[in-house]
Amino acid sequence: MILNYGSVKYEASYGTAGQLPLSELPEIAFSGRSNVGKSSLINKFFGRKNLAKVSSVPGKTTTVNFFRVENIRFADLPGYGYAKRSDAEKKRWAELMESYFRTDRNIKLVVQLLDMRHPPSQDDITMINFIKAAAYPFIIVFTKCDKLNKTQRQQRRAEIAQELSFAGEFTAVEFSALTGEGCENVRKAVEEYL
Ligand SMILES: Nc1nc2c(ncn2[C@@H]2O[C@H](COP(=O)(O)OP(=O)(O)O)[C@@H](O)[C@H]2O)c(=O)[nH]1
Ligand SMILES: [Mg+2]
């Protein structure tokens, strides 16, 4: 299915579990730790500068944000793994995520983001295991690839194969919000799963 990316509309943001509306629309979810480059990817993906707020201060996005292209819904999930968050904030995050994934959603694909430079964190591993256990289709987008030179990239590819062997087979896309590299591949993957 071909998407009219330019027609994207912001729908709503939800900060607490109880507010999350049910949904039957086919949905694509973006997931990743805080500061991984999720907002930057979403902006590139839709070809918009400020659809999702990019922050140099990590830990800002703690809501589920919905966007819509025709009858497809996109969910920007709250970033995880931000160390300076209070216990109350962590609890709210966990409840929000639980209720998001519990409300019988029609999730077609989870786009899981990992910073290409670093091994997955314990939180990343927990997230990927959850996605697998729930049997959601997923792809992994390796962000900030512009920060690695050719040699470093090759090396990381080899390491990633080891680090993510537990995840089984998946589509991997190397992505840079700076250069736009990989954006078409993310779009192609999303369109395929839709
Ligand atoms: N060099 C580079 N920096 C990036 C890239 N993506 C995001 N950033 C930077 O990383 C920081 C966090 O980005 P943001 O999109 O807000 O991350 P989020 O917290 O996951 O939504 C910002 O300073 C971005 O400018 C990328 O592909 N390349
Ligand atoms: Mg963000």
Image (cartoon, helix red, strand yellow):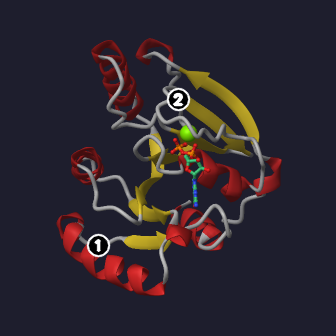
The quadrant the C terminus occupies is bottom right
- Residue 25 seen: no
Q: Which mark is residue 60?
A: 2
Q: Which mark is residue 80?
A: none
Ligand 2 quadrant? Answer: top right
Left or right placement of residue 135 versus residue 113 in this view: left
From the image, tell me which residue sits under label 1: 160
**Gap in Å between the C-alphas at discs 1 and 2?**
28 Å
For residue 60, above or below residue 18: below
Secondary structure found at label 1? helix
Q: Decide: marks 1, 2 in contact (CB < 8 A)?
A: no
Please tell me how crowded label 2 is: few (under 14), some (14-19), or many (20+) other residues with Cα within 10 Å.
Answer: some
Query: Cβ(mark 1) to ligand 1 < 8 Å?
Result: no
**Residue nearest the viewer, comparing 132 with 60:** 60
Left or right placement of residue 140 versus residue 41 in this view: left
Q: Residue at 47% x, 50% y: name it.
A: 36
Residue furthest toward the right?
A: 7
Residue 99 in the image: x percent, y percent? Answer: 37, 25
Secondary structure found at label 2? loop
Query: Cβ(mark 2) to ligand 2 < 8 Å?
Result: yes
Identify residue type, mark 2: Lys
**Residue nearest the viewer, comparing 51 with 146:** 146
Please tell me how crowded label 1 is: few (under 14), some (14-19), or many (20+) other residues with Cα within 10 Å.
Answer: some
Residue 187 in the image: x percent, y percent? Answer: 62, 65
> Of label 1 and label 2, which has the lower sequence position?
2
